[in-house]
Amino acid sequence: MSRVQQLYRLQLLDSRLDGVKKRLAEVEAGLGESRELRQAKDAVQTARDRLKKAQTTVTDLDLEVNALAQKITNHEKLLYSGKTMSPKEAANLQEEVASLKRWRSQREEALLEAMVAVEEAEAVLSEAEARLNEVEKRWQESQAGLLAEQKALQAELAELEAQRPEAVSAVDGADIEEYEALRRKRAGRAVAEVKNGVCQGCGVAPSYSKVQKARSGTELVYCSTCGRILYAP
């Protein structure tokens, strides 16, 4: 195998390694709760808080209405008990009963509105929970897929990393240094194949003489445009 062939073999291995590492990072970034899932959970919690507040309002108003009813009953019992009281005291008590009844009527209306608010809050919560169930199901399916892909990528990464030392050892030390330097400068791609007369690194066609020299594989030939080592099979 020629110098360039050895380097190209290493380049293919490193390109695959880079791709696996990149995809593995993307997969691992996707593991855990998604933004959609967090938003769905927040919506459910907000709906629960709203329902709890509405239920508390109903409870408070119900207690208030019952207390007013009891107070009215007590006052009316006193009025009709036959107990001796002055006309002024009787008039004041009657006025207070009338006032309490007006206030009770207002609080009963408020109670009805609060009960409607509870029904609305229950509907919102039911909808939010249904939405959460849908999102959670999709998320669980997605997580299962990502975990399976993560496992496969980790296995492939381990296999590729185990192959690299052998591929490196087959290349001359000076060529490795040149290769690694070009990898750093050219976004990880030091060797570019010439296909249909075109450098696959930059898309420009090298001269015929360069391609022929690269094809011999006895020396490193560089693309005049992108500077990568040319591999011409």
Image: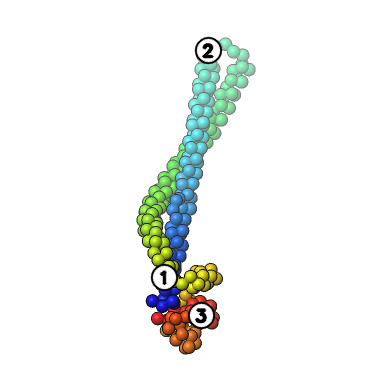
- In the rendering, at what x and y percent does residue 227 appear? 53, 78
Q: Which mark is residue 222?
A: 3
Identity, as a three-letter code, of the amino acid under mark 1: Ala
Residue shown at 40% from the left, 81% from the top: 233
Quick one: SS at disc 2?
loop
Camera sees residue 223: yes
Q: Nearer the viewer, mark 3 or mark 2?
A: 3
Q: Mark 2 against mark 1, which lies toward the viewer? A: 1
Q: Nearer the viewer, residue 10 or 36?
A: 10
* Disc 1 target residue: 170
Q: Earlier in the sequence, mark 3 or mark 2?
A: 2
Residue 124 numbered tag: none
Q: Which residue is mark 2?
A: 82
Q: Inspect the image, locate mark 3, and give the three-letter code of the amino acid beneath it.
A: Tyr
Tell us which disc is closer to us: 1 or 3. Answer: 1
- Give the SS element for disc 1: loop
